Image (cartoon, rainbow, N blue to C red):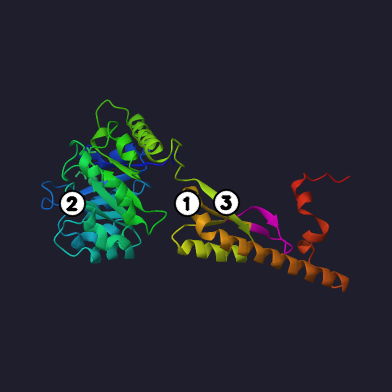
Amino acid sequence: MGTGRARLAASILDADFSNLGYAVRRAQKNGADRIHLDVMDGHFVPNLTFGPATVKGLRRITELPLDVHLMISEPSRYVQQFVDAGSDSITFHVEIDEPIEPTLRIIRAGRRAAGLAVKPATPLSALEPYRRLLDIVLVMTVEPGFGGQKFMKEPAKKILPARDLLSHKPVGGEVHVDGGINRETAEYVGGLAVDVLVVGSALWIKGHDMAREIRLIKALADEGFQYQLNDGKPPIPRDNWVTFASLPKAIGRQLMYEIEAGGIPVIMLRADGQINPDGVRDYELLVPAQVEALTHDRHAVARAARLQEADAWRAELRAQQAADLAAGIPIDRSKLHWTQITDEDLQRPRRPRS
Ligand code: DX5
Ligand code: ZN
């Protein structure tokens, strides 16, 4: 995984269709974070591409996430097939003439990320009724149908406000931009905090070094973000995690549930926490660095309470052990850290036995 904030999804629409497997492997080898698959039905857009069988075939040859972009009039008819084919996310257009919500629910029931796309002339208000069901908002900056068209700046202005539609997802909600993204336009859309840049034709130019193109486009998007929205500070890499609390396992788990209920993922790790009188180390609760401040705002009070609870538990355990010892009741040697070894001793390197 790359550092930095922006992610790049390689669209294979302009690759050589006689060997799509090769195209996907090549994009992966050259640093694409995702593969973007454009499905067209010759009806919703004046072009035809491929269906679920192709997605299924490509699923076998790459571990990269597959973002499926359905430009079809009846997604409800085919969506289950795209779920079964192994798509990681499925995004379809809000401009279709059939109910939207059932299709979003099928995607969610399949535990895939669900998205809605807007054509250049469609306002974000069209997505409003479905916001709670969305993981992805895809902003089109060309008319859907073909690769290699010129980027439209006006519709790109929807990128920043699109984030508000995903406010129920402090982590994991994504705004994608699709159409005309290249080294000329990446900085601008990065400055609007886009999460995923869909890049098609710019990657498949003969004689161009694809890896360099991908690095350049991502770096430019991150620069745009840094100077437009982040006070000149480089963005926090998306994969960074920070320790929010160090707690005994059972107590830590409670805090983890509370944090995750608000949509912030937590990783609980047996790491370098202090050793408790029961001989088990504290667990570390990690949260994504991007939402460290938010986690603090929401849960600092609960954390203080849990730390107190942990201290009380330790004190109780120690008192019990002291009482047992005084009464001559044998104590499990593995649970004697509090009498035999201090925390400080644990920090020091062990002295070799003489
Ligand atoms: C167009 C597709 C795009 C297309 C983008 O309808 O949705 O994903 O591949 O191609 P470029 O990057 O060339 O505009
Ligand atoms: Zn697309």
Q: CA distance from mark 3 to mark 2?
A: 42 Å
Task: Please indicate, yes or no, whether residue 80 appears anywhere in the rendered image.
Answer: no
Q: Position of residue 304 (x, y in %)?
A: 61, 61
Of the image marks 3 and 1, the number of the one nearer the N terminus? 3
Q: Quadrant of residue 203?
A: top left
Depth order, front residue of 227/106: 227
Residue 122 circle label: 2
Determine which residue is flagged by label 1. 291
Q: Nearer the viewer, mark 3 or mark 1?
A: 1
Q: What amino acid is found at the position of numbered circle 1 in the picture?
A: Val
Amino acid type at mark 2: Thr
Instruction: Find residue 195 and report its horizontal and vertical position in percent.
Output: 35, 45
Q: Residue at x 77, y 45 (%)?
A: 348
Foreground pick, 113 / 351: 113
For marks 2 and 1, the one nearer the N-term is 2
Q: CA distance from mark 3 to mark 1?
A: 12 Å
Mark 3: which amino acid?
Thr
Q: In this figure, which residue is indicated by the disc labeled 3?
A: 243
Q: Label 2, secondary structure: give it.
A: loop
Q: Quadrant of the N terminus?
A: top left
Crowd rating for badge 1 (residues with CA inside 10 Å; few <14, some 14–19, many 20+): some
Q: Which residues are magenta?
A: 269-282
Residue most extreme to the front: 231
